[in-house]
Amino acid sequence: MEMRKATMNDIEGITELMGHLGYPTTFNKMKIRLNNIYSSPDYHTLIASDNGKIVGMIGLVKGYYYELDGLYIRIVVLVVDKNYRNKGIGKQLLENAESWANNIGATGIGLNSGDRPERINAHHFYKKNGYVEKSIGFAKKMS
């Protein structure tokens, strides 16, 4: 299993992974999204590949606290191909993300995970890896 920073050459694999996460999209839409993401130095995207096939990814964004000194990392996406789950890939991606966060001086790392029934396994995964439930999230769609 290879872990590396994602590039624009990974669009096809990342597009497929979005479907595994429950957010199907097209190659062209993902290309536009990744152009925006990769243009910002505050984003960091890692992928896991198995013999050249992209089987997992984690997307991170750096933020600055208002209420504290320092910076934090937010995991904005973590997904493993359904055919590769329960093989430690998600854990490796999480460990690589935490290592990057430490290297840039982050004092915390967090994420939001939907409260849909299909996310229960993900919630167990995060708890098993040291993450604790801390807040309730709210969202509003803007037109």
Image (spheres, rainbow, N blue to C red):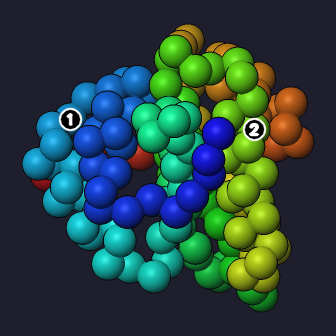
Left or right of residue 6, residue 87 in this image: right
Q: Is residue 107 above or below residue 87?
A: below
Left or right of residue 37, residue 42 in this image: right
Residue that badge 1 annotates: 25
Q: Residue furthest front?
A: 51
Tag 1 or tag 2, which sits nearer the N-term?
1
Do we see residue 138 in this rendering? no
The CA span between labels 2 and 1 is 25 Å
Residue 62: mark = none
Percent x, y of residue 11: 28, 49
Circle 2 crowding by C-alpha within 10 Å: few under 14, some 14–19, many from 20: some
Q: Amino acid at mark 1?
A: Thr
Left or right of residue 37, residue 104 in this image: right
Q: Is residue 6 above or below residue 84?
A: below
Residue depicted at 26% across the width and 69% down the height: 36
- Between residue 77 and residue 90, name the one nearer to us: 90
Percent x, y of residue 47: 52, 49
Q: Amino acid at mark 2?
A: Lys
Residue depicted at 49% across the width and 78% down the height: 42
Percent x, y of residue 126: 76, 35
Residue that badge 2 annotates: 91
In what element is the residue under mark 2?
helix
Percent x, y of residue 1: 65, 39
- Between residue 60 and residue 63, name the one nearer to us: 60
- Between residue 110 and residue 95, name the one nearer to us: 95
Residue depicted at 45% across the width and 59% down the height: 6
**Residue 23 placement: quadrant:** top left
Q: Is residue 110 above or below residue 38?
A: above
